[in-house]
Image (spheres, rainbow, N blue to C red):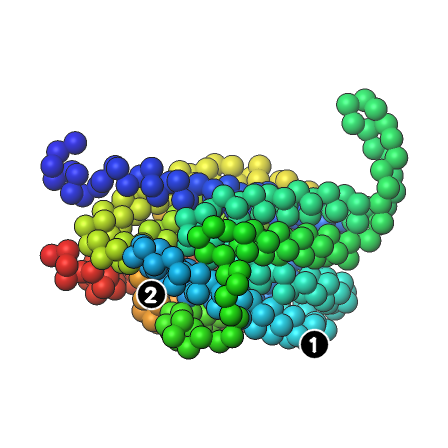
Amino acid sequence: MTKNGQRALNTGMMPVILHLACPTMLEQLMQTLVQYIDTAMVGTLGTEATAAVGATSTVNWLIGSTVSAFGIGFLTFIARALGHGDHERARRVTSQSTLAVLFAGILFTALPLALHRQIPVWMQTDRSIRETASRYLFILYTPMLFRAATTIYGTALRAAGDTRTPMRVGIAVNVLNVALNFLMIYPTREISVLGTRFTMIGAGMGVTGAAIASAAAYAFGGICITVSLWRHPAISPKGLSLRPDPEILKPCLKVAVPNMLQRFATSFGYVAFASMINSLGEVSTAAHTIANTVESAFYIPGYGMQTAAATLAGNALGAGDGKRMRELTRTAIAIEVALMVLSGGLLFAFAPSMAGIFTRDERVLALCVTVLRMVAVSEPFYGVSIIIEGMMQGVGETVKPLICGISTMWLVRIGGTFLCITMLGLGLQAAWGCMIAHNMTMFLLMLILYLRGTWNPLNEKTR
């Protein structure tokens, strides 16, 4: 490679980035596989069951992404402290993350449980599935304290460069979830394995059984990740005070709150988006749910790389290493584009096979394939915006992504979908077209911010 080529792309950074990203990708892959299995298993119960589970899935994104925003605030300062070599400060930041776990866990248990009957109504679900959707939501959010621990403590461990522990816990949770699904969803029945027939016991609880299985697995994961954090040699909060520490909390919240507002506002946009799609009827709701499930697997490279980029950007900032920051940004974007071009191509090619896993309804299948192939083309562009946002999170810049995220979500996706569905009477394809337009607009805005360089506190030192 030429000298100029080395300046544009430092291949020596690739092993470092991939060492952090790959365990996160594997963890997300396992989560996605379990989501596939969940959807397929519920799908055997019929289109109504799939629609009942999918009708409130965007509420799950809303709450989950808001909780993860707390983790980003702590990730930034743990990574920065470790980059500076200040292990004691990193431990103090971790101890304060416990307050975020308690706050988020209690708040997001109380709200869904209090509103579980109203939420399916607000989501415009068919009357025939509202009771099932309500019960599913109630059970799923009972162990929210454990889910908050898994999210926030897992982020803290990744900030310390430990991506393997959250991966192992995630795999264990997902295996448990699948095993419990087999026991809880279906009734006692005769099954055959390798020619041997035997009786498999089952509770026969259907959608309710799927919710119980997930809730139990979430509780198990929260306990495991908490124990792992307390035993961690570098950032364990063991022995430290859990009282609020303004010196630590103030800068963490300064990063976390804008990120939380962005995720809440954009995820609430997903709720509004899904609500408009639910109004199109059962077939569109089921197709949308299945397409989202299929598509989630192809975002794994993007979000795995985002975590690595955020951690390494925080480390570079803590060390005051402008050259390393510059090399990181260029290399991470190059890897991300390559991965997302590959994933987009696979999604386009295998859309019929992937969607066919979850439904036998020809109407639902045809609609799924159409929207999946539409979105596949935009995958590389969406990946670039993800990685740029991750680097900004790593250095504590969350205000600019907040403005970009909210404006594109509500002006482009929600405004466009309202126009297409409510005013023009168009269908699911038009709604997903608005989603793609949102992703492309977000890409352009984030690219402009990246090229300007004002997000990088070390920019003056790199000139």
Q: Depth check: give the residue in front, 446 or 309.
A: 309
Q: Position of residue 433 (x, y in %)?
A: 44, 58
Q: Depth check: give the residue in front, 449 or 93.
A: 93
Q: Residue at x 53, y 66 (%)?
A: 98
> Which badge, 2 or 1, comes first in the chain's sequence?
1
Judge whether 230 appears above or below 145 on screen.
above
Which picture quadrant has residue 301? top left
**Does residue 338 show up?**
no
Judge whether 280 appears above or below 121 on screen.
above
Q: Which mark is residue 114?
A: 1
Circle 1 Cα neighbour tier, 10 Å, few/some/many (<14 / 14–19 / ≥20) = few
Q: Residue at x 40, y 71 (%)?
A: 248
Judge whether 67 appears above or below 462 on screen.
below
Which picture quadrant has residue 354? top right
Q: Residue at x 70, y 72 (%)?
A: 113
Q: Residue at x 58, y 47 (%)?
A: 170
Side of 190 relative to 35 (left or right): right
Side of 37 relative to 292 (left or right): right
C-alpha distance separating marks 2 and 1: 34 Å
Side of 309 relative to 111 (left or right): left
Query: Which secondary structure lies at badge 1?
Result: helix
Q: Position of residue 206 (x, y in %)?
A: 79, 52
Marks 2 & 1, CB-CB < 8 Å contact: no
Instruction: Name the residue that disc number 2 marks.
Output: 396
Judge whether 306 appears above or below 57 on screen.
above
Query: Which secondary structure lies at badge 2?
Result: loop
Give the label, 2 or 1, closer to the camera. 2
Amino acid, disc 2: Gly
Image quarter in which the C terminus is found: bottom left
Amino acid, disc 1: Ala
Q: Depth check: give the residue in front, 193 or 435.
A: 193
Q: Position of residue 37 (x, y in %)?
A: 66, 43
